[in-house]
Image: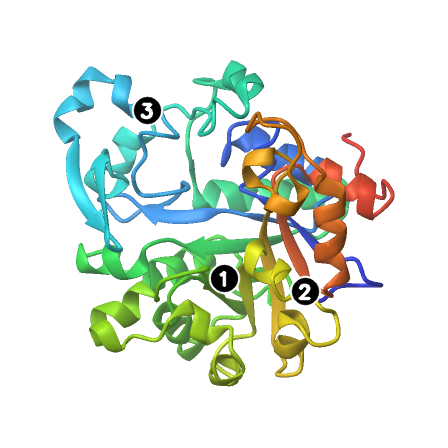
Amino acid sequence: MSAVRGVPWVIGHRGAPGARPEHTESAYRLALAMGVDAVEPDVVVSRDGVLLVRHENEISTTTDVATRPEFAGRRTRKTVDGVELDGWFAEDFDWAELATLRARERLPSLRPANTAFDGREPILRLRDLLAIVDEESGRRQREFAVVIELKHAEFLRSQGHDLVPLLLAELAACGWADRPGRLVIECFELSPLERLRAAGVRGRLIALLESAGSPADELARAGDDARTFDWYRSDPGLDALGGRVDGISVDKADLLADADPRTGLVARAHARGLSVFTWTLRPERAFLDPAFRRGEAPAAWGDWRREWATIVRSGVDGVFVDHPELFLTTVRGGEGAGVQ
């Protein structure tokens, strides 16, 4: 899982959402065809305990639920990890209802071409995604990996849905419980990762670290005394993570701010036996570090090559990308980037 010959692990972030609506079957199959090392599904849960692949538990930005008159009465307001949201939430629907929804582009103003695929595909369960990876691994004679992100674990647990046993059961049912080299589980909260480790999960555990704020589970437990994500990126914080998790995954802005390959964040984490991932590499101006932006239009592509090269030089072990073909053709020189 570490960088090989200076080239990091390439993770299709929700598939290949630069070319298809995220978390759809076509997005995942396209990413695997492009030659990624792994794909990343975000996982939430239905009312009847089915693990779903969605960016958030609020589903109006990625499905057609808001246009469905039969579900108009499900609209509600919730505070999720301190953020008040208005919309439709996966945990208020049974899987049979969710299965009738269709996926749509989450960023239509930045990726208008993807809207041509709106309404074509249903949403996926985690087991559907794992089956896709199995099928493509056999078809392409290559063992692809999966990086599963547990979303809003503390909030969903407060709603009666514990993602940890649900995930353990799903992995066992799908034949993924004993694939340590191909399974990664990540979360912005440490307690689910520690519970997975205590349960003997055979996979690597990665602590996601936001730029600001504190982990939701620590806030629930310690309030104002909760440690911050910034503290976890410090030397004492990295010391505290050593032995508890296998690595960290950081916002690329935090990596770029401390990118010296000898003394930066990656080097400090490596010195403590922690691998480092970063998210999310995208070419659009709206997502680039200010130093690499060009023009004024948010959807215009800036100097993404230089930004990504800086990230690779940091020694990072894995990168989450929305356009796998761009990274593979520029960093790996085209190796594995052809779509077959």
Q: Nearer the viewer, mark 3 or mark 1?
A: 1
How packed mark 3 is, by other alpha carbons closer than 10 Å (few <14, some 14-19, many 20 or more), is few
Residue 222: image location, x then y, percent = 23, 76
Instruction: Look at the numbered discs 1 and 2 and tell me whether their residues touch, using CB distance below 8 Å.
Output: no
Say the numbered circle drawn on residue 259: 2
Displayed quadrant of residue 99: top left
Displayed quadrant of residue 70: top left
Q: Residue at x 75, y 64 (%)?
A: 3
| Residue 139 seen in this snapshot | no
Residue 274: image location, x then y, percent = 60, 76
Q: Quadrant of the N terminus?
A: bottom right
Q: Is mark 2 on a helix, strand or loop?
A: loop
Disc 3/disc 1 C-alpha distance (Å): 28 Å
Closer to the camera, 270 or 293? Answer: 293
Instruction: Look at the numbered discs 3 and 1 and tell me whether their residues touch, using CB distance below 8 Å.
Output: no
Q: What element carries label 1?
A: strand
Residue receiving disc 1: 185
Above or below, 70 against 125 in this view is above
Q: In which quarter of the image is the C terminus?
A: top right
Q: Is residue 256 left or right of residue 306?
A: left
Residue 144: image location, x then y, percent = 67, 51
Which of pointers 1 and 2 lies earlier in the amino acid sequence? 1
Residue receiving disc 3: 100
Name the residue at the left extreme: 73
Q: What residue type is labelled 2?
A: Ala
Disc 1/disc 2 C-alpha distance (Å): 25 Å
Q: What residue type is labelled 3?
A: Thr
Which of pointers 2 and 3 lies earlier in the amino acid sequence? 3
